Image (cartoon, helix red, strand yellow):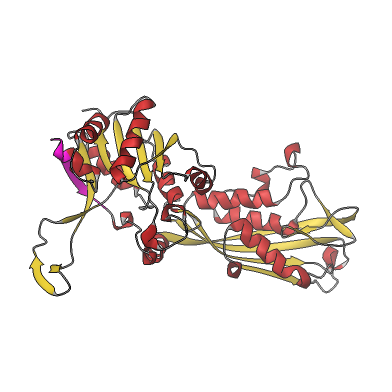
Amino acid sequence: MKLPTKNVALIVAAGKGERTGGEIPKQFNMLGGKTVIAHAVDAFTSHPAIDAVFVVVGEGQNQALVQALAGRPITGSVVGGSERQDSVRAGLNAIAAAGGADIVFIHDAARPFVPLHVIDHLFGALQSVEGAIPVIPVVDTLVRDDGTLGDVVDRSGLSRVQTPQAFRFDAIMTSHIQWSGKAATDDAQMARNAGFKVVTVTGDALLDKITHPADFALAESRMKSSMITRTGLGFDVHRLESGQKLWLCGIEVPHEKGLSGHSDADVALHALTDALLGAATRGDIGDHFPPSDPQWRGVASSRFVEHARDIILDAGGMIDHVDLTLMCEAPKIGPFRDRMRARIAELLRVSLNAVSVKATTTERLGFTGRGEGIASQAIVTVRMPKEV
């Protein structure tokens, strides 16, 4: 049987996340440099067989979704209902209104990491049945518990159910229409109740759901274990000239001279950009922002840093540490160091403790020693997925 060509991911992100104890729903919390919902969206948009992604959010969460996705394109979003099945139904209706689908993957946003091999296995299973779900065998001892230890429950044949759950679109629509029972905990039971065959495929521990505050730490740990550490080095030099503003590390520093260059000539941020691009193995600043292109004339160098940052974060990477050194006789960097560190931390979306800014002189030797220019060197440490 030939696989359908129109495959849609439906990410359910309408929960309030009350059990995680945070001020905002867990799907909008940061995890490894980007939001939980962004991780899920990236997983599906990066799979070559997924044609569209729809997201279901709660009432009043549309703006939060826009901010959480930070420009990531999705096909559409819709407001869900009070129960999970109501939210899924709203998403299915939105897909139907947009032209329908052949296969739909229904996924909980609170499961941020979606291994591509699980999606592949679900696709394979749907060649002969109407539904497929990932499961993990239960390995812990199970007991009955009412406050006092009860009998052991036989765990043979028991599994933990995960998402994404994949269905032929017409089958899961029919399942939702026919459902008349109590609130359903997942869509697979609704499909089974409607008479459709649902098979299981091997799940993955990375698909475990974030429910409690401690789950964020566990998710970070799992994310780190699947990554390798890389180091990037950047170096840049700019000439000092009268009549120019002096920008260093993203802040304006009072001085009798400023740096000359095609952009705002922030030598520190240029070195930082090159370091980030080097860690991502994506060339150098000139490849992305050629000085021959007039659109970059006078532009703030913070845009270069944000671009390099997003390359790393969009690939599922994490920025761990930045060590930046400025080489000049003047101005004195010490009075501005804290502001510089804060600005870099803001641009990279890391903690202040992850940013070091230092300054040195060249003992009045060379062009920096003669006050003709300023040089900067940056070293960054990042973690990237092993396959990137």
45 to 134, vertically: above or below: above
Return the x and y of residue 342 as percentages of the image width and height.
66, 64
Residue at 40% across, 66% down: 217
Residue at 39% in and 26% down: 98
Figure label count = 0
* 294 displayed left or right of 133: right
Q: Can you see residue 293? A: no
Res 209 quadrant in image: bottom left
Q: Position of residue 162 (x, y in %)?
A: 26, 51
Q: Is residue 197 above or below residue 301?
A: above
One can see residue 342 in this view: yes
Q: Which residues are magenta?
A: 192-203
Tell whether 229 sits left or right of 136: right
Q: Is residue 124 magenta?
A: no
Location of residue 214 (image quadrant): bottom left
- In the image, is residue 201 part of the stretch drawn in magenta? yes
> In the image, is residue 54 above or below residue 247?
above
Q: Is residue 157 left or right of residue 331?
A: left
Quadrant (top left, top right, bottom left, bottom right) of the N terminus: top left
Q: Residue 49 lies in what quarter of the image?
A: top left
Residue 29 place in picture, x, y as percent: 47, 56
Is 65 rendered above or below residue 53?
A: below
| Residue 117 image position (x, y, % from top left) | 31, 46
Pick the residue in front: 25 or 169: 25
Residue at point 70%, 42% (across, down):
290
Foreground: 340 or 270?
340
Of residues 99 and 265, the one nearer the viewer is 99
Which residue is farthest top? Answer: 99
